[in-house]
Amino acid sequence: MLNSLRSKWISLLVVLLSLLMLLTGYATLKSMRANSMQQAELSLDVASKVFQQALDSRAAQLTNSVSLLAADFGFRQAIATAEQATIESVLQNHGSRINAQLALLLTPDGELLASSARLDSGDIRQLIPATQGSSAVTDILLLDGQAYQLVLVPVRAPVIIAWVGMGFLVDVPLAEQIKGITGLDISFTQQDSRANQQLTSTLPADTQQRLVNKLGDILATPGATHLAADFNYITRGKALDNEKQLWALLHMPDDRWLASYQQLRHQLVEIFAFGLVLALLAAFLFARSISKPLSQLSHFAKAIGQGNAAEPPAISHDEIGLLTSTLVSMQQSITAREQQLRQQAEHDALTGLLNRHAVELRLPGILKTQHGTLLQLNIIQFKHINDTLGLANGDTLLQLLAQRLGHHQPAAAFCARLNGDEFLMLFNQSLSEQQLVDLYNSLQPAYNIQNSLINLKIAIGIYPFEPEQGTTSEALRRVDLAQENASLAGGGIAFYQSGQDETHQRELTIIRDLPNALNSGQLFVVYQPKVELASQQCHSAEALIRWQHPQLGFISPVDFIATAEHSGNIGLITQWMLRTVIQQLAAWQHDYPTLRVAVNLSAADLLDQNLPEQIKNLLDINQVPATALALEVTESAVMQDTSKVIANLNTLKAMAINLAIDDFGTGQSSLAYLKQLPVNEIKIDRAFVKDIETNTNDALIVNATVKLAHGLGFKVTAEGLENQAGLSFLKASGCDTVQGYFFSKPLAANDFSKWLTNFAATTTPTAEVSE
Amino acid sequence: MVINILGKIAGTMKLALIAGGLVLALILHSSQLSAASLTISITNQQQQPLADAVVELRSLSMSDIKPQRIQVAQQKLTFVPFVSAVPAGSEVDFPNLDKTRHHVYSFSPAKQFEIQLYADKPEAPITFDTPGIVALGCNIHDYMQAYIYVSESNLVAVSNEAGQLKWPDITPGQYQLHVWHPWQLEPWQVTTLDLVMPLQTAAVSLAIDLSQQKPQAPQRGFGNR
């Protein structure tokens, strides 16, 4: 929060303002205080003068009184008597006339004649200077420990016969009297270390007590103005006597000027508070005027980042506005580039049609709500065309085809190129057969590629769809299946047939489940014995794979082997078969040392150059002799890459493994290759065997094949013998071994062992019989 | 402390005697005189003639005192004369020449008296028996002052405005010289005077308070006459 622009602004302003206010306030208060102090000083000056005047006027009054007294004839007469008692009594009498608290009489030379108080020599010494003159003298003196305003007047008769002194106490009544004139409280005290610090004051008693504690400080510099925090008076001393022993302290209450000082201070605080609030408000508003547009811009920028079409904030004429317009232009650039990217992302660079990605984006919405027709087109043998004409011409051809698709009427909702030579068209309507034929025909005319006219074979798969009928991937798969069917048909139009997709799904399940099934025991091997006709003995068998799927039930090897071959998983099956069979052979090695079991290999297996090595390893690990293993390959497998397959077969044969050609007679066999193949055996397909006793052609083929094989040095096995009649034919044709339900169906390993034992026990008589 | 110095006849010779600011000059003629005249000139510290100075000559062989009768009048609200000098036992009249009454008094130790409010002439003079200085005052006119010097000797006189006083016929011999003035700053230190010449003069210098003035009636207010 403290990092926000607003709080920074506010803090800065508040700090600056506070600083300014404090400085201003300090200066103002200081000068105000100085001013107040000056005024107080001035007042004190005036009061001090008034005080002095009051004292002087009192002195003059007293002098007059005493002078009159001294001129009184009776007084002079009494003094002239020089009788101590008379003098003392006249002093007392006349002193009381003028309310003097002290009366004394001195000789013209300043010696004490009489006194109403007990004066010591020090007191009298103070008086001597006054008697040197010839006129009245007043002073304030400390006599007998008391402060007196003393008036000394010469007594003339008519020459000076004595000095009479009358003293008037400097006390509270005097202070009150002067207070009445000056309006200030007054204290009298003395700077006399000998005497106790006496204080007579008009101040309240408790204030006096506080003053006593401060007397020391005040009397250290009595002439200065004193201002103490815990004493509510401004105090200044004024010397009463010439010796500066006696002091009058003038007290001016400080609340008068302090009040105005405090009022000003209070006002300053109020102004400060008001200014602060104002500044806070201003800072808040100002910061808001910046931070709000910034925050709006931030939201705007965030919206741009998320790709939302946000309304930009109003563009002002300041830096914020500049930023806003920059962001707006950035937004426009981004939109333009996005458009471009989308164009590139959704369109095929070569043909300008939509690509697969775009199709996948659009199809779901269409499939959900509409009915229509989905077409997938494919150029038959396009790879061949590409190889022949070159990639560049191939591309041109694709562009030409795309153009025709694009210009076709009725127009497709969209045309797309899915990949390579695969195109997709979507129509928002069901197309009649005629319309489809028109479309097909429109693609038939030759395409002009650098003045060469090229004719294309097009396969079109058609999938009409209804709303909510399936997902995009289903639709695409179905149209793809249809097109595949068309392709397999060598071109033309094929509709998707319902159920095709389910078959396909089953294949997918098989492909998916196969690896797991191999490990979880769903697959197992059965063995079908091969019986030697000559000896009526069984020394070999063919291992066949079986799959009991938990959901799909028994799956025919025809189905999943083909699927595995398509999906490239056949290697896994072969490996598993080899491992399982060789392990079984190892187990049988003791009981049936001459038993040879054949395993089927696929075309992919034969292309794998590591196969011989792997087989060797398996045999070695299980300590099974190579002669116990036989491998069966189909003619079509051999035809894939003949030289490589033959090389592999040679290696295997060199390992002393028995090799056989399976399903002989049904594949695209080439007799030219037959002589090159390093095999030991030919297995005649069951198609020629199962009806041999009724079909003379089959019997002929079998006879010829046996003769051909024997001629080439191969053994011959007939597959699929089902009855006794067939056996006779086969025997007659010279077949070496026979395999089929007539002897036994394929058996699990245990059952096969039992069968083998039984057969060995029962065949000897049979053999004798048949021979 | 006396220093005798003989001077020549034909002129005068001034000898300076320094004793309390005194300068004494003697003019000598011859010894063995039956009578002589003595003139004394008195000056203040500024060599100006000093009036109202009292000089008393006291002989070692004291003769009888011959009392006098003088008067100290009150005229124009002052005492006239300001200073009087009489041998002890003399009588003094205080005639009132003014229209107003006066109340003459003295609290001086030599003679204390008062003549309460009176006009014209009191019934009886006042006798001054004790040698000393009597300060006179008037109780209703405080500024009025006057002095009466009561001497032990018959030879006592007051200097005139010229600061001079003269005894035309006195017996030659040795005298104690006493000088007094109301305004003197210091008491006079007694000196000895040898009177040997038929016409002898002496000069006396006396320091006084120069600020003093003879009492005078106020020019304004009551009692203007």
Image: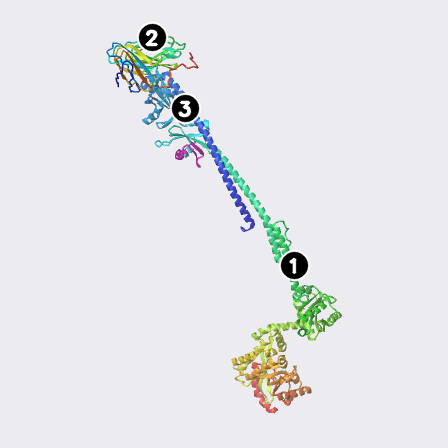
- Quadrant including the C terminus of chain A: bottom right
Dot label at residue A543: none
Viewer-side residue, A325 vs A594:
A325
Viewer-side residue, A11 vs A616:
A11
Q: CA distance from mark 1 to mark 3?
A: 111 Å
Residue occupying the point 62% across, 52% down: A324
Where is residue B58 shown, x and y percent of the image? Answer: 27, 14
Could one spot residue A696 in this view of the protein?
yes
State which chain disc 2 sits on.
Answer: B
Dot label at residue A336: 1
Q: Residues within 10 Å of mark 3 (few under 14, many from 20)?
A: many
Q: Residues within 10 Å of mark 1 (few under 14, many from 20)?
A: few
Q: Is residue A215 magenta?
A: yes
Task: Give, as a single range, the part of the protein colored magenta.
Answer: A211-236
The amino acid on which the numbered mark 1 sits, given as a three-letter code, is Ala
Asked if the residues shown at circle 1 and circle 2 are in contact, with their CB atoms under 8 angstroms apart, the answer is no
Q: Is residue A188 magenta?
A: no
Q: Earlier in the sequence, mark 1 or mark 3?
A: 3
Where is residue B200 shown, x and y percent of the image? Answer: 28, 13
Q: CA distance from mark 2 to mark 3?
A: 45 Å
Q: Nearer the viewer, mark 1 or mark 3?
A: 1
Dot label at residue A59: 3
Q: CA distance from mark 1 to mark 2?
A: 155 Å
The amino acid on which the numbered mark 3 sits, given as a three-letter code, is Ala
Name above or below for residue B118 compared with residue A203.
above
Name above or below for residue A147 compared with residue A750.
above
